[in-house]
Structures are given as structure tokens and as C-alpha cells.
Amino acid sequence: MNKKVIRLIITIIVLIVGYLSQVSSPQSTDQLTPATISKHIDGDTFVVEVDGSQETVRLIGIDTPEKDGPYTEEEPFGQEASNFTAQALPLGTTVYLQIDESDRDTHDRLLRYVWLSPVEDLSDPDSIREQMFNAILIDKGYAEAKTYKPDVAYQQIFDDLEEEAKANKLGMYQ
């Protein structure tokens, strides 16, 4: 093969790898959509205003205990988890929504990771622990890590945070 063909092949491979790394990894802050908290439902569900519409958001990769409601009975630590979310995300707070694989669940709620601020690197473990609300709920013991395939971009980090919360007897693990 001549040198021009080899260079062309290498260039094409580099471009394809670069494209695939952008598409397949949750690292770019342009994947974040600003939204404003407009109503609290429970620890892992709330309503936001996004692009002029009201949308219910269900946090991906976690599950908080249920509080007493029209469709559920209260579980231990459900009210505390709900209160934590309401205090951490007061009405009017701007958050940043990140999609994984699924857009909505069977209840037509948006499935999202929720960031408190845009961060440089969405895969940085410290940023996830400190700025992603899903992770914060696990880290403080208000939620357990829960795998809902295919939305698993941060699942290993969530599992590790849950183990730490249990070991430190935080929140519902007291």
C-alpha cells in the first residue's frame, strides 16, 4: 500500500474513534439541559419547568423509600428522604438534566441524572459525588443504588457510594 492510502485509513480510524467516544460516554456538558424545580413529589421524583413545559423527573439509578401518598404507603425513612430533596432543591432552583439511554418511564416521567451545576467532566468521580444529585442522595444514605437497564452509565459509582453509606451508617442505614 502506498503512504497516501495508509494515511487516509489512519485518519478515518482516528475520526471514527473520536466520534464514538463523544457519542458513547457521558462526558460533555453540552448534554445538560437547564431546568427549574417547580414542585416536590418525593425523594427521587419532582417536577421541573424545562423549555417552557412542566415535566415530572424521576432520578435514574436510585430509589428512595416511599413517603405516604395516594398510591403508596410510607416506608421507613421515606419522609426524611423527601424532606432532604425539598431542602436541597428548593422551588426555583436551577438544575441540569442529563439523559442516559431511556427518555421516559412507563409513567411518562423524564428519566434523568440531575446535576446541581454544569461541570467540566461528567465522568469525574469527585464531580459526580459533589454535584450530581442522584449520587448525593446515595452518598448521604437517603437512597439506594438501583439498576434499571439500559440506564447504567453511573451504576458502578452509585454501587460504591451505597457501600460507603452503609459502612458509615448514614441516613437509612443508621
Image (tube, helix red, strand yellow):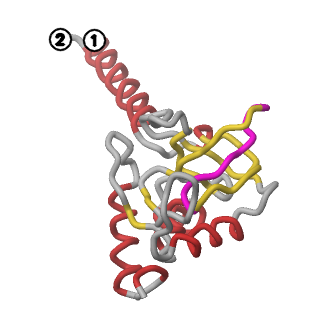
Q: Residue furthest left?
A: 1
User: In terms of depth relative to the viewer, which is nearer, 57 or 97?
Assistant: 57
Q: Quadrant of residue 57?
A: top right
The location of residue 54, given as percent across then percent down, is 73, 37
Amino acid type indicated by mark 1: Val
Secondary structure of residue under mark 1: helix
Relative side of 66 to 32, left or right: left
Marks 2/1: CA distance?
7 Å
Q: Which mark is residue 169?
A: none
Q: Is residue 44 magenta?
A: yes
Position of residue 8 relative to residue 19, above or below, is above
x 46%, y 67%: residue: 143
Instruction: Find disc 2 in the rendering and name its residue.
Output: 1
The location of residue 25, given as percent across then percent down, is 42, 41
Q: Which residues are magenta?
A: 43-52
Q: Is residue 73 magenta?
A: no
Q: Residues within 10 Å of mark 1 (few under 14, many from 20)?
A: few
x 64%, y 55%: residue: 41
- State the predominant SS element of the stretch in magenta: strand
Amino acid type indicated by mark 2: Met
Q: Quadrant of the C terminus?
A: bottom left
User: In terms of depth relative to the viewer, which is nearer, 41 or 174?
Assistant: 41
Q: Residues within 10 Å of mark 2 (few under 14, many from 20)?
A: few
Q: Quadrant of the N terminus?
A: top left
x 43%, y 58%: residue: 62
The location of residue 142, given as percent across then percent down, is 50, 72
Asked if marks 2 and 1 touch (Cβ < 8 Å), the reply is yes
Instruction: Find disc 1 in the rendering and name its residue.
Output: 5
Secondary structure of residue under mark 2: loop
x 45%, y 35%: residue: 106
Relative side of 159 to 135, left or right: left
User: In terms of depth relative to the viewer, which is nearer, 167 or 110?
Assistant: 110
